Amino acid sequence: MCFISGAMAIWWKTALSPPDALPPLPEVIYQYPDSFALAEEYHKLLAVEHYTIEPNDTLHQVLQRFNLPVECVAEWQKSCQEDCELSDLRPNDELTLHIRREDQQVVKFVYSTIDGSTYTFRKIGDGWKCQKDRIPSITVVETVKGTITDNLYDSCIRAGLPGASILQLADLFAYDIDFVTDLREGDTFAVHFREEVKDGRRVRVDAILAAEMTVDGELYQAFYYKLNDGYEGYFDADGRSLCKLFLKAPLSYSRISSTFTHKRMHPILKIYRPHLGIDYAAPHGAPVSSLGNGTVSYLGRKGGFGNYIEIRHGQGYKTTYGHLAGFAKGLRTGSTVQQGEVIGYVGSSGLATGPHLDFRFYKDNQPINFLKTDFPNARSLEKSQLADFQRQRDGYLAVLRGQGSVRFTQIKNISQAGE
C-alpha cells in the first residue's frame, strides 16, 4: 500500500494534468538553422572555385586562369609570411577561392597542402588575416594487393599503392629479387602499410608493416619487427633478417645484355675473350648503386672500362663498375660508401657500343659469377623473441591474405597492427 501526503498529491495532480489543462504555447516559433538554405544564400553572393595544382603550375598562373589580379599574392603572403610560402606550390596541393559575385573580388582563399596543412586567408577591411588549421592528421593502415601485368611500378600504381611505398617494397626485396629481370606477368604482391590522412586526403606515407610477393612461383615475405635492444628491421617468416651483405643488382632500370662467361665475342674487338662480369644495359645517366658497404679503392679512367670504380667490402669481397658516364658528387678514392648509395651513372665510356654498366664481383681477387652466388643474412632474431615475432607475423599474414583491401583503419597500437 502506498501513502501520498497532501503536498505530494497536489504536485502529482499538477504534473499529470491532461494536455488541455497546460498553459498555451507562446507565439514565438523556434527554428533550427536550415544548412541547405544557408548554403544556397551563400552561393548567391559568392562563387566557390576549386583547383588542384598540377606540375609546373604557379599561383600567378592559377589567378590568371580565374581572371584575378596577381596583386592578391603579395597581400596574402604578407598576412601569413611566417607560416607558409605561397610560391612553394606542389602538385596535388589544393586551392579554394571564394569570389564575391557583384564585383569579382576574392574575399576568402584556402590553401591546402599535400602534407595536410591548411591556411585560410580572409578579407578583413582593406587587409587580410591568415589562419593556420592545426587539426591533426590520423594514422591509419591500409592493405593493397595486386598482380604484375607489366612492370612493378605501373602494376602497383593501378592497384592503389602509393609511389613511396613502391620504392620501399623494392628496397625490402632488393636482396632477393631483381625487379627488372625476375618479374613475370601474373606474379602477385600484397602490401600492408601505415599512412597519415587528413580531411580525407593522404598526407604522408609511412613504413611498410608487412609485404609478400610471389615471383615465378616462389614466395618472398617481409615483416617489420622491433628487437628488445631497439633495432628495427624486416625479417622473413622464420625470423631471419632480409638484409644481406649485398644487393641483388647495382641498378634498378636495366636488362642483362651479357652474363658471366669464359668465352664471349667482344662487340668492338670482334674476338673471343672471357667476360668475367655482367653487363646491365640501361639508359644513359641511370644511377648506379654500391652493392654493399665498403671503401672506394679506385676511381677514375681505366683502359677499356672507361670511367671506373672499385669498392672493397671486407671479408675478401670486391666489386667494380665500368663504362660510367660520371661519378657521384664528392666521391673519391678512399671514400666510405653505404649499401645502396649512388656512386655513379650509366654511360658508354671506354670500349662500349652503347650505354651500359660493366659490373664485376670478386672474392679474394678471384672473379666469381655474382648471379649464382648466395650470401648470408645480416642478422636473425634470438630464440627468446621468436614467439612474440611469430604472433605479430601471424597477425600480418591474416591481413595480407584477407579478402579485398583494408582502407583507412585507425591504428590503436602499432605493435598490434594487423590484428
Image: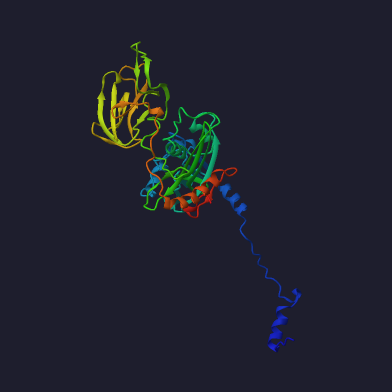
Q: In this view, does 382 lie above or below 323?
A: below
Q: Is residue 183 above or below residue 6?
A: above
Q: Classify residue 353 by image quadrant.
A: top left
Identify the residue at the far top of this view: 270
| Percent coordinates x, y for residue 185 in the rendering | 54, 29
- Residue at 26% of width from left, 27% of height from top? 299
Q: In this view, does 387 lie above or below 344?
A: below
- Residue at 49% of width from left, 47% of height from top? 393
| Percent coordinates x, y for residue 323 in the rendering | 32, 22
Q: In this view, does 63 lie above or below 139?
A: above
Number of disc labels: 0
Answer whether residue 101 is visible to the viewer in this image. no
Q: Please name whichever residue, 400 or 54, is drawn nearer the observer in this view of the structure.
A: 400
| Percent coordinates x, y for residue 356 in the rendering | 37, 22
Q: Please name whichever residue, 174 or 413, is drawn nearer the observer in this view of the structure.
A: 174
Identify the residue at the far left of this view: 334
Q: Please name whichever residue, 96 or 10, is drawn nearer the observer in this view of the structure.
A: 10
Answer whether residue 134 is visible to the viewer in this image. yes
Colour pattern of the rendering:
rainbow
